[in-house]
Amino acid sequence: MKRESGHLFLGVSAVLRHELRLLFFAPLTYLFQAAFLLAVNAFVFLVANFYGSDEATLRLLLVFLPWVSLVLVPALSMAAWTDSHTSREIELLYSLPVSPMAVVLGKFAAGYLLLLLTLFMTLPFAFTVAYLGEPDKGVMLASYLAAALFLGASFAVTLFAGTFVREPVGAFVTGAGALFVLMLCGWDVFGRLVSDLLPQWAWETLVVYSPLTWSQVVGQGLIPAQALIYFLLTIAGSLLLAHWVMGERRRGGLRGLLRVDRLSAFAAVMLVWLAGIPLSERIPGQIDLTEEQEFTLHAGTREVLERLPEDTMLTLYWSATEDTVPASIKSHARRTQSLIREMTKVSALDWKVVDPKPDSESEIQALSQRIHKVPMSSGDHFFLGLTVEQGGRIGRMPYLDIRRESLLEYDLVQALNGLSRQSTPKIAIVSPLLPSSAALAEREGLSFMAELKRAYDVAVVPFFKTEIPSGIDVVILMGADILHEDMLYSIDQFVMAGGSLIVMIDPFSRVKRANNVTNPSPSDEINDISDLLARYGIVYEGAAVVGDAQLASIVSDGDQGRLNYPYWMRITASDLSAHHATTANLNEVLLVEPGAFRLEGAAKALVTTTESAGSALRSDFEQLTPRDLSSSFASESEKRVLAATVQGPLKSAFGSVPDLSTPVGHRPNSVGVPLIFAIADVDWLFDPFSLQKSNLGQDTVVRPLNDNLAFMLNMLEFATGDDQLLAIRSRGQLHRPFSRVADLFQTAQAKAQEREAVLAQQVGELEQQITSATQGAGDVSYEELPESVTAKLKEFESALLSARRELRAVRHSIRAEVDRLGRQLTFLNLLAGPLQVGVLGACVFWYRRRCTARMTAGHHPAQIG
């Protein structure tokens, strides 16, 4: 056995060296590589406009690689088995003392190495992604692994398909056809075409036989055992079948394939492939390469699952037999089922799937459970929702929105966690911005309320009330600047009793401008909420609005174009406290024209600016445009605190019981561990600063734009004791944008900011001069004006036109620098492929000449001196 293995290895090695020489000494190889790289880069950068995608991933490489491979991989393999009058290579190979299997393996290894080398030459694209943003390195590695496995399977399949044809062109067509059929199985369109010919289960099973399916799964950063088995069986099976076919060709023809023993062997291999791939789904184990372990159950999830009682039942309502459901929704449903299976392995959770077919009992059951019947553009409907039941208690998720795919684990755990709670935490919101009906019906701009009601019993308390209702766990104050003295005392005593308080206070509100009439400010007496916060160690500084040029957001300023606005701050992880559970796992929070806090005692900062923070007076925001505010921004070289927290024990803000309408017992010190959170902004939670909303039936489905909502829910969960859910929702970056592009835009604007401010001032002065020159002229035409006035007007208008032209040029230069980078990167990536191929060709040419020169020198007769 060892001797045969040794002979096989030596044979493969000999064929491999021979094939590599043929490949690398052939000019067509370099043409193939250049075409491959040019096609991939052209699709990614020109067709898909990668630079405009603002997505620092290799996703587009995996999107277009199969299309390019469909043509170029068969082109590489088509000459592998050529056996014509002009080429007797196969006959020569089989006359050598190597086994037929060694020939097949050697040819595969040589071609696959060439494909891997060509794939390696796409690294400039990976470097471009890393240069533009901060990609998930694990996902990038997985993307290249997916591409390598896809190329290996494709090459093995085309090699096998080409064994039936002696001519290269015929081998190309056969290989491309076989590869196309396999790829077709992974397309949703194909399922619709055969839905009338095959049963539902049959054509949906075809998906697992497509290399497209598994390259997409692996490319996301997840390597399940089933994916590895698919590629292993596909490559090994194709090469084994190619070996048998070439063995029959060596014996004189393909008729030997019709022998019973050969047909039985072929059938056995196909049966292993057809049955082994779907059955391998039951094999446990997977490798999660994502930095945030997106596909691995979180420790907090396991903690919740371990608490579930034995009789907990999850019912998934999924229209599995509805053939018009988009492929993306089907993929989302498969991931949901896979996640539920993982949960059942570590808990007592039982589950079942119900298919609500039209006009069936199961559809009536789904509707009775208030699962949404989601309409599609085709006129059909589908269901994708679930219920969880235990001991008569029931929770439901009417629709598992694909836009919340990154929060799928959190949503499922939250639904299950609700069953194990003895009672639902009660939240009271006190705010002049919210009507009392906001707790019952959805209102425009308040999508975050739908998220709060998913897990909490929410009540909106009118801000003119005098006390907090009993039984409340957390009080949220949103823009409640002026409160009755009785209410202030009630809030203080609520905190002293161990309650938790979340305060949102804002120097300038865009949601409700009328709220800007008043502005709380700490004083010696307790007059407003800022006085309470100051007594607890969080001193509100609301006389000015805080901004930071390093954290500026790109906004639109009407018709004047885009600009970096320092008062809308995108605060990333570096300025979010890593030492507090509410912010430790957040990636980005957006605060909109906030104030700041000064901390005393035990208070701790949660969200801060950089050292480049500055401020502007509140009144400026009523009078100036965002561009004017941005142009006049100046750093004060001071870090400011935008959100803070303090934890008990605390002392009451009231030294004694004030003169109240209702006498109560006074608590001078806190009991338990009260929590206070303070955020110097109110707008941050409202649409469109934190969420995108869509209505579905009577419910509102929202998709987070940043971690604002996550931060809010983190504070609530921390305050109500559900802190095991914090990291589940917060982990994972929602989006990996091109941070370098944003930085470049910010730098370009900073360079032009001073000149832009001067020009804008000049334009304003000229417009005032024109107005002054025509003042007192009355309603007369231009021709009737005195000559001295018209001369001044012409002078002013000429200067105004010149100033406006220069101002437009300055603003255009800001965007032009960003666009220039995009063109440069596109050109470099398009050029990089052929350039690498040229260098490789030159190196091989030099090596070949050197070898030839040595051989020639070795045959010269010796010279006698």
Image (cartoon, rainbow, N blue to C red):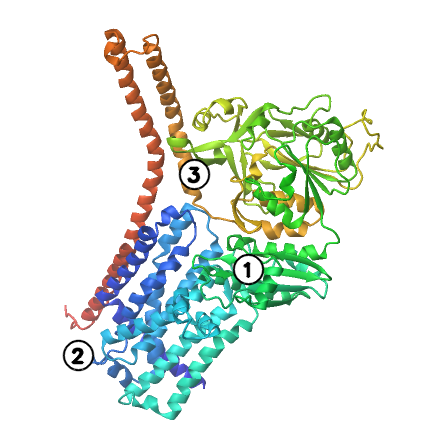
Q: Is residue 42 left or right of 547 when viewed as pictured?
A: left
- Circle 2 sits on which residue? 86
Image point (37%, 46%), residue name = 52
Residue 93: name its quadrant. bottom left
Mark 1 vs 2: CB contact within 8 A: no
Label 2, label 3: how far apart the Cα atoms are: 61 Å
Q: Which three-letter amino acid code belongs to the residue tagged 1? A: Phe
- Circle 3 sits on which residue? 743
| Circle nearer the N terminus (1, 3) | 1
- Circle 1 sits on which residue? 295
Q: Is residue 586 left or right of 331 when viewed as pictured?
A: right
Compared to 328, does 762 lie above or below? Answer: above
Label 1, label 3: how far apart the Cα atoms are: 31 Å
Image point (44%, 69%), residue name = 207
Are there few (<14), some (14-19), or many (20+) residues within 10 Å of tag 2?
A: few
Instruction: Single out the mark in the foreground, 1 or 3.
Output: 1
Q: Which three-letter amino acid code belongs to the residue tagged 2? A: Thr
Q: Which three-letter amino acid code belongs to the residue tagged 3? A: Asp
Residue 299 visible somewhere in the drawing = no
| Circle nearer the N terminus (1, 2) | 2
